[in-house]
Image (cartoon, rainbow, N blue to C red):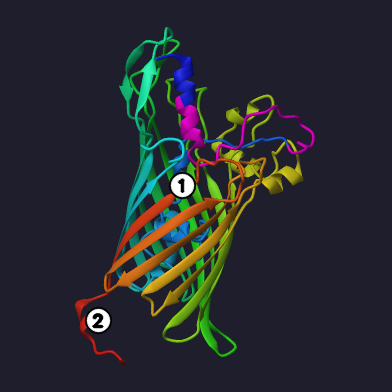
Amino acid sequence: MNLESFKNLLFVSICVASSLSAASQSISTNELDGRINTINTAVPFLRIDPDARSGAMGDVGIAISGDANAIYWNTAKIPFAEKNTALSVTYTPWLKELVNDIFLADISAYKKLDDNQAITASLRYFSLGSITFTNISGNVIGNFNPREFTFTGGYARKITENFSTGINLSYIYSNLAAGQSVSGISIKAGTAAAADISFFYHKDTKFGNTKGDYNIGLTISNIGNKITYTQSAENKDFIPTNMGLGSGVNFKFDDYNSLMFAGEVNKLLVPTPDSAGLFRTKSVPSGILGSFSDAPGGGKEEFHELMFSVGSEYWYRNQFAVRAGYFNEHSTKGNRKYITAGVGIKYNVFGLNFSYLIPTSNQKNPLDNTLRFSLLFEFDKTKSAKSAPTSE
């Protein structure tokens, strides 16, 4: 395997969570004046939304109602979820405008232990398709299937009637080219451990004569050690530690119609690249704390590192949903800008969600036509609750 092959493989891995519109350019310590300075991390698949419901709402998920995919967005939501047990299975073909064999698969579930606490778990698998390795002479030396996965377990608990908190622990595995070598350096699978901490506030209220509720959520995710693909202690990369703050409001007009609006802002808590490359030498704590003030372009560039998303969801009789949203990332930080739309159907314990992504850029975009499909299974608290008479 030659050096160029491995560089290309790493590039593909880095680009899976971006629109590929950003490119590496020189960085000065003065104002960037529009020059591109993206923040790249290892295992970027951790920031790919595995949920077709949120995927249809501009990737909004921190402060919407809890479901089986809450472990990705905000585990603290689960104690407020309507159902006792839920399971979700999602399949997402990724970067299909570039290749046809990259995909993300996810299975997530939760179980309420009682009215105040719950446990949750998920397995996320990301396949980068098939890669053909060649040596320095261009001769084929074999094929490989790069793959990554993460297993996560979590616990959530209500602290008060309206406030809850949650914590997750994850094991991360990334195998891009294990068993190969680059310039005599052996490549191995990278591993890491990470934690999430989340908070959620839910309040039932009235908006005039209309019943409803509102939510506020905060999540800091992927707090973990650096990852490396060699034995060298110097070649380590940050994983995508992220902080997200969101809010949502839901209007329940009557027994048949409800409408929810939500928005959130996210920021990667990893160092911004500098011209000397010193950002890679920082420790995880200093990288997180310094991520609010280390941009070479100062406060203006720090603001550009914020990612904004908004979304809405309309339900009819709690059986049919229509969703839409918008996601925006600054042009110097990845330039992901897209509209999303989708629908959802519920029938008894079964549900199906579908989402579609439409980039707003005029140029060809590898995120074009991104689809997500989620199957949902939700179960009531007890058999007696199911058999209890209703008011209908």
Which residue: 37% across, 24% down? 177
- Label at residue 270: none
The amino acid on which the numbered mark 1 sits, given as a three-letter code, is Ile
Residues 136 and 341: in front is 341
Q: Which mark is residue 385?
A: 2
Bin the neighbour count of mark 2 within 10 Å (Cα to Cα): few under 14, some 14-19, many 20 and up: few
Q: Position of residue 148 (x, y in %)?
A: 37, 37
Query: Principal SS element in the magenta part?
Result: loop
Q: Quadrant of the C terminus?
A: bottom left
Q: Residues within 10 Å of mark 1 (few under 14, many from 20)?
A: some
Residue 66 is a magenta residue: no
Q: Please give the name of the residue rendered at 29% of the width and 72% of the height, measured from the top-left corner.
A: 347
In front: 211, or 236? 211
Q: How many marks?
A: 2
Q: Residue at image x 46%, y 36%?
A: 98
Q: Is residue 30 magenta?
A: yes
Image-quadrant location for residue 256? bottom left
Query: Can residue 171 be seen from the camera position used here?
Result: yes
Q: Secondary structure at mark 2?
A: helix
Examine the rendering and report whether any part of residue 50 can be seen: no
The range drawn in magenta is 9-34
| Marked residue nearer the N-terminal end (1 or 2) | 1
Residue type beneath disc 2: Ala
Give coordinates of residue 378: x percent, y percent.
29, 68
**Left or right: 120, with 136 as reference point:** left
Residue under label 1 = 48
Pick out the residue farthest to the top. Answer: 137
